[in-house]
Amino acid sequence: MPLYHALLQLGGAIMMLLWAIRMLRSGVERGHGALLLRLTNNPKGGWPTSALTGLLTAALLQSSTAVALLVSAIAATGTLPLASALAMVLGADVGSALILQVLATDLSWLAALLGLVGGALYLGASSRKWRQTGRIGLSIALVMISLGLIGDATEPLRDAPMLVPAVQYLNSDVLTAFVVGAVFTWLVHSSIASILLIATFMGQGIIPFELAVVLVFGANVGGGLIAVGLTLKADIAARRIALGNFLFKLVFAVAALAIVYPSGFAVVGWFSSPTGIVQLHLLFNIAMLVLGLPMVGVVSSLIQRLVPDARTTNADAGENSRLDPRLLQDPRSAETCVKREMLAMARHVEEMLHPVAELFKYPDQEKIQKIKQLESEVDRRHTEIKHYLARIVYDDDQSDRAWRCFALADFAVNLEFAADTISGRLVKLARAYSRQPDVFRAADWDELFEIHQRVSENLQLSLNVMLSEDHLSAQRLLGTKEKMALAERANVINHIQRLRADATQSNRAGDIHLETMRAMRQINSMVASIALPFVDDAHHGHLRLDP
């Protein structure tokens, strides 16, 4: 086979591998995004639990980099401490390495089975979740097929005249080989693909075992570089997490190289096979987790000094915006920016809603002032989101991508309305209640705190729906509107019955209670509005195979 033909086949096979890995991650995000949000949204239990959360999330996403970006988006809202975020990313590296064990296994029969079942599900299932599960099966099959194609394409390269001296040079220059492994991984933006290629090249006899070890250590550093590059223009929380993960990988990779190199790689001789190289990658990440987890507190303090908090002024109050104007030509990336900004906006609404029930008992002026300040921030973000959405460039204004951005714009309007209702209506009702002699009955207080809790939970569910686009969660969220309407109707009936029992009293507290229930229901309707587009999407269904 001519050399150019082999290189062409190799390039095509590598691109198939990269595309299959990306499509695999997209299938998990779209079909099981609600589960990802439940896993990563402020885990309890300390650093070990955070690490386990990161491991499970990476096992679902097949990418520690994707977990780092997801964790960064959550940490940017202020709900996830830096140390916990670093622990999650360390666990994610192990989860990604575990999935690599499966992908590197030679199971040709499994590739055919996954392709058959996955294709049938994707093309035939009516449920969005099942279609995305089919996408996952197809993606894993394509990964295995592409690895086989890479093996076939590299076989003629073993005796290529230009390859032999290049491999010999890298084998004699450990530092250059280490940098090459890091840079190559950064270029392909996938440590999984990089490690699989290294194992395949070693199995074909193109590179020796010693060089493969050095490249694997370098690939781990390159995996950390990916997140650093993607968060250069992000907020401080995201940059800190990416930098902390990179420093962990760099220090441990250099330390591992310093241990194995003086012995002539004898200490890792047991891993001298293509499968062993993948296992060495897993062992490295497990060691980094076990040894690095107790250090996340110290490292987080160091990172906070290296990347200090920015000084904010009124002139640059919007500097923490996630709306990157450079991405306006790329609707998919711009939509991601909008979702991250709306996540921050919704967190502000959540902060406003949290103390409302207590204000009826204790009208704390400091808390009321904080609600007013948060309302101004929600208004600012709402305005910025609208202007940003209006500037996104679409190939077709009737496209599915444009339609989704219009749905996000509608949700932003509704979040802003919810914030206005909290600040203008609920705070006013709390103040009115504190100035009149009537008191809520015990049943009224129970209803108030119950509906407050339900609205808070539904706000969280609305964020899950927005990020995951899971139609089952959307249907559940939409069902809360009817439940809230029934609850309000029951409150009215109870109020009328109490007035009948004692018609001599004005029961102003009862009137305030009913108005509060009405305002709460309106807020719930606003946050539940995000469900409508994704319920409609599930009914109409679009059979797309975009990654």
Image (cartoon, rainbow, N blue to C red):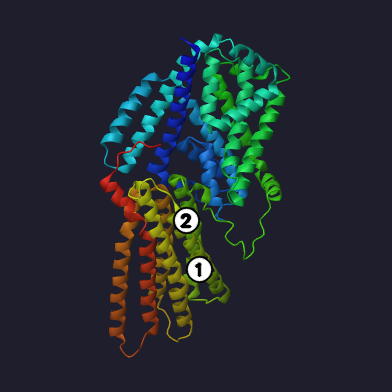
x and y, in percent, of residue 214 in the image: 64, 23
- Please report the residue visible at 48 percent of the width from the left and 55 percent of the height from the top: 343
Lower position in the chain sequence, tag 2 or tag 1: 1
The image shows residue 198, relative to residue 362, as above or below, that is above
Between residues 455 and 316, which one lies in front from this camera angle? Answer: 316
Amino acid type, callout 1: Glu
The image shows residue 370, relative to residue 299, as above or below, that is below
Between residues 522 and 8, which one lies in front from this camera angle? Answer: 8
The image shows residue 370, relative to residue 168, as above or below, that is below
Mark 2 = which residue? 388
Residue 130 position by quadrant: top left
| Residue at the outermost right position | 262
| Residue at the outermost bottom position | 504
Secondary structure, mark 1, is: helix
Measured Cα–Cα span from mark 2 to mark 1 = 20 Å
x and y, in percent, of residue 362 in the image: 52, 76
x and y, in percent, of residue 57 in the image: 48, 40
- Please report the residue visible at 55 percent of the width from the left and 12 percent of the height from the top: 205
